[in-house]
Amino acid sequence: MTGDDRRLAAVEDVPAESTLLVTLREGSDEREALLVRLDDGVACWRNYCQHWTDVRLDRGSGARVKGGEIWCQKHAATFDPTTGECTFGPCEGAYLEEVDVEVRDGGVYLADDDYAFVRQGPAEENTDESLTSGGGRIDFTGS
Ligand code: FES
């Protein structure tokens, strides 16, 4: 189980100033994680803020990476992509949850036995939300 079923992406597919969203499986649950470029490779972090854990850092089109930090779009917390530490903001000092990956042969491979690779892109439960991520939530039911 060390072949292509563990290959998350090509290194060159991980953008320099954003992140690449992947979906993993932990037991029977899907979990999102984001890949982020480092000076010497790629890191992988679970895709939720340490301030409000229901807030996704990458909402499907890449998290903001600026000044060498990953930004939360909700209240502007910043995270060190190398260590996962929140360096500024309401959750300063907290750490993102790491997923172990390794880079070889130009690819990023899942090295964490807690997870299996499902797909690039969002988890099933977030595929509809991506349609409304640019604005507020609209209730069409009238209830
Ligand atoms: S939810 Fe991310 S900083 Fe508040």
Image (tube, rainbow, N blue to C red):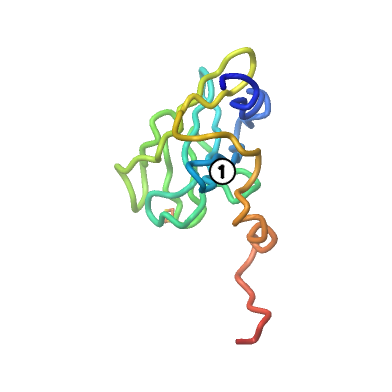
Give the percent coordinates (x, y) of residue 45.
47, 37
- Asked whether 113 or 22 is in front, the reply is 113
Q: Residue furthest top?
A: 105
**Residue 83, placed above or below residue 59:** above
Mark 1 vs ligand 1: CB below 8 Å: no
Q: Quadrant of residue 141?
A: bottom right
Q: Is residue 91 above or below residue 14?
A: below
Q: Residues within 10 Å of mark 1 (few under 14, many from 20)?
A: some
- Mark 1, residue position: 64
Quarter of the figure with residue 140: bottom right
- Report the amino acid beneath label 1: Arg
In the picture, which quadrant includes the C terminus? bottom right
Q: Residue at x 64, y 75 (%)?
A: 138
Residue 60, position in %: x, y?
Answer: 63, 48
Residue depicted at 58% across the width and 34% down the height: 117
Q: Residue at x 68, y 28 (%)?
A: 13
Residue situated in front as seen by the camera: 86 or 21: 21
Q: Is residue 97 above or below residue 75?
A: above
Determine the secondary structure under disc 1.
strand
Task: Say left or right for 39 vs 91.
Answer: right
Where residue 54 appears, as percent x and y from the top left, is 46, 57
Residue pictured at 63% horizontal, 27% vertical: 5
Q: Quadrant of ligand 1?
A: bottom left
In which quadrant of the rendered image does the N terminus lie? top right
Instruction: Count how many numbered circles sit on residues in the image.
Output: 1
Residue 129 appears at what percent x and percent y? 63, 60
User: In terms of depth relative to the viewer, which is nearer, 69 or 52?
Assistant: 52
Taking the view exactly as shown, the residue that stands out farthest to the left is 93
